[in-house]
Amino acid sequence: MAETHSLQDLRQAAVASKVFVQRDYASGTICKFQTKFPAELESRIDKQQFEETMQTLNNLYAEAEKLGGRSYLEGCLACLTAYTIFLCMETHYEKVLKKIAKYIQEQNEKIFAPLGLLLTDPIERGLRVVEITIFEDRSIGSR
Amino acid sequence: MPSGSMSGGVSGPTSPPQPTVPSRPLRPSRYVPVSAATAFLVGSTSLFFCFTCPWLSEQFSVAVPIYNGIMFLFVLANFCMATFMDPGIFPRAEEDEDKEDDFRAPLYKTVEIRGIQVRMKWCSTCRFYRPPRCSHCSVCDNCVEDFDHHCPWVNNCIGRRNYRYFFLFLISLTAHIMGVFGFGLLFILYHTQQLDRVHSAVTMAVMCVAGLFFIPVAGLTGFHVVLVARGRTTNEQVTGKFRGGVNPFTNGCFRNVSHVLCSSQAPRYLGRKKKAQTVSVQPPFLRPQLTEAQLAAKVLDNGIHGDLHRSKSSLEMMESQSADAEPPPPPKPELRYPGMSRGPAGHPEESSLLNKAPPTPTMFKYRPTYSSPGKNHTALTHAYANQMSRGDSLKESSSSLLQSSQQPGYRSEPSLDGCEVGGAERSGAERTGGGPGGPPASGIPGYSLGGRSYPSFSDPTVLTGGASRSSSVRSSHNAPPSEATTSTSYKSLANQTPPPGPRNGSLSYDSLLTPSESPEFESAAPEMPPGRPRAPGVGYSSPYLSAQIAQQREAELHQPSASSAVLLASPQHAVYLRGSIASPPAPPERERERLLHDSQPHHHHHHHHHHHHRPPRFSRPPLLSDSGPTQPSYPYRTRSTDTPLPPNTHPPRSPHPPPLGKSLSYSSAAAAEMQYRLVRKASASVGGGGIQAPKDEIQMKSYSRTNGQPKPPFTPSSPSHPVSVSTRPGQAYSSAGSSQSPAHKPGGGVKKVTGVGGTTYEISV
């Protein structure tokens, strides 16, 4: 839940519902989320915008899971140091996850929050779903 | 050590709200194998270094102990990583996530991966639909991503994150054992005159230990080399998921190997620091510009959302589930979309989902995008039908089913697996035979066909008839019980161990109310009465419904043998079901099916596993259609069904084709199932009642046969993984046997094999 209970957050809007965008397994078990526009967001956000956000996320995850020279070198180095390198170095995937977290934060601030939505980083859900919280719109003519 | 996670050094969640893995009681017996393995490894190597290496380094070169030292270090590092690293445990889903997957959510969701239908099972412990290749380990009580197996020698699950280390551990251990043995032998050969010395004795002892462990370790290593090359997990191999040969997860040998060895370390899901939400969301909110179409849709939707929300969500759940269950008869078109009669202009996206159905924005509006879009609408409608307890909703669902069944798009697709001759032929025949609304042409649901999972409802008349019947049954019978049961969430039911209710086969309300959560060995489900010409694809998720329908059907169809109520679950006889599905369109198939039906009335279970009443989560809706092989897609329908067997006397329970089924169905299973079906037929003819033994044998035989490997490949693994690997098959067999035996008793109950937390071992018999 995005709501907290500090004073300043009391003004946070109430959560109306949550939408869960599931993984898209059409290409296997690579991390990819469905870009299909959920019906519940119909009136809240542009389809285009949403799809663009999801596509960017998918691209970032693809980059994290890429089998390239970089990940191979990382593996070799880890092997040679008896995996002690993991104590000091951050893996490639983790680096990309940080990038994704930053991206989601930025999207939330710029695009989603003004529309009364909030994206939750899927890593908190085990990369199974992207949770979009829809906030109640108490303004006139809402919904 | 209880599922420790070492990567990153964080063990367990740090903040209270974080979804955590519940702590389990300490079980000392879990640590015996790992302690023994560690002791042998460290002890033997130390003795080797102390007694053998000094002489070797003097005699030959200092490189000998250095090489052995490095090798040993490598073994230890990989052993530690395999032991302490989080294998890829999924955190429990939070409450709000499964709100939609509520009471009537189906037990399975189907998703298409590269054209192959794969089933995702609802994990009642973890509260989500297990992603493909994920499995719940009953030892660790966690769902693990890319679950390979639970290794007792490292006392940890082997999953996505630590498979690489486990694999390297095996390889390095093999090399290390060979090195120790070789150098020890060298030592002995040079000391044949001084064998009474302590050094020689110790060296010989170390050689013995090394030689003893070499065989199982090398065997297991070879086994895993093959698995890695083929892109399979131990779980998939052991349960025979890809017997037919089509593995949707493989990318070719080189890419499979590079994925295992060279991919970046996967992140852990547990124990992550939860970022505080810094973005404040406050009204007033902006609104996007609405297009004309959206406005029109909004108008149409008005007032329907709330009413249908519940059913819709359940419907959505059901759509994939229907793949496993017998789809309910297609609802009448006009009743299909409640309240939508005025709204033909639904959302363009959604209307495209159902080719011929009027667009129903409300139907899909709340559907979470679980499965690939466009594929589940039929299932959705079916699910919807299944779930409805109210009469009108049933009608709606039936009409939707009818619609979906009539959609040509869902028919047969060419089977992806070329080797599934049987399946392909069958599907081909079905295809030709069934047009939209025709007899179960849609035939075997996707299992054999590359991408479709819900073919079954092809026969509109049967379906409609069934639907109306079922609806009446449902409303009359199911309403009260369903109310009662729905009050308890399906999930909670799923989590319970079924009470020892009346399992004597009588269709009792109590038994219906007490779904049992058992692992996938549903075996207990009674077979569908043979010869039921029911159109395939008619399935209901509600056990009540199925029971009623089964009873009605029995009456109608005057089955020779008491047909087990559809209620009962399910056994997974996809093969059988598939065959029966195709009956109308393919006369030859029909004959075969008839024969099969007659001989093995239990086959219907496959689709009717939804023995439990409502909560689809528990079990797949028992196939209402008696023979209705509608469900074909999954060979491994396992859900246990506690529903009591109807007073049926089916002697043979449908043996599950593959000995260990999984919740995932693959098109390759079709061919395998065909084989089993024939095998079973033979076995069934042997004797009605006591089929247990032969069935098990046959299953095991077929298992080993279809496994694509001779038995030997498993023997090496068994010593090394006596608990982890072999238990599974063993358990599968035993569960199959045990589950089957009760079923075989006249009106016997269903035996469930449950793991911890009600999860199964991912293998269904």
Image (spheres, coloured by chain):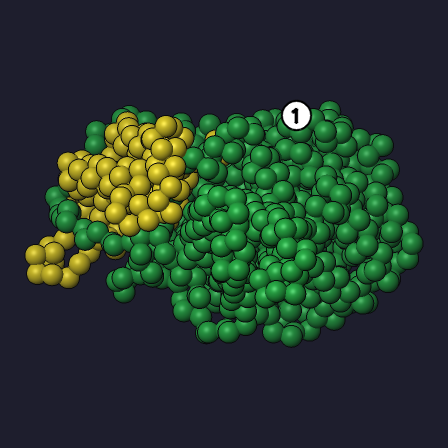
The kind of secondary structure element at disc 1 is loop
* Residue at the far front in the pictured view: B193
Q: Which of the 4 image quadrants contains residue B195?
A: bottom right
Count of numbered marks: 1
* Above or below, A69 relative to B107: above
Horizontal placement of B220 versus B296: left or right? right
Inspect this view and state whether residue B231 appears: yes
x then y, percent, for residue B741: 77, 65
Residue at (78%, 46%) from the top-left corner?
B702
Residue at (91%, 51%) from the top-left corner?
B685
The amino acid on which the numbered mark 1 sits, given as a three-letter code, is Pro
x then y, percent, for residue B461: 70, 38
Of the pair B399 and A22, the residue shown nearer to us = A22
Residue under label 1: B414
x then y, percent, for residue B163: 49, 46
Horizontal placement of B681 versus B168: left or right? right
x then y, percent, for residue B242: 65, 39
- Which quarter shows the N terminus of chain B? bottom left
Q: Colour of chain A?
A: yellow
Of the pair A43 and A109, the residue shown nearer to us = A109
Inspect this view and state whether residue B340 appears: no
Rendered green, the chain in question is: B
Q: Which of the 4 image quadrants contains residue B349?
A: top left
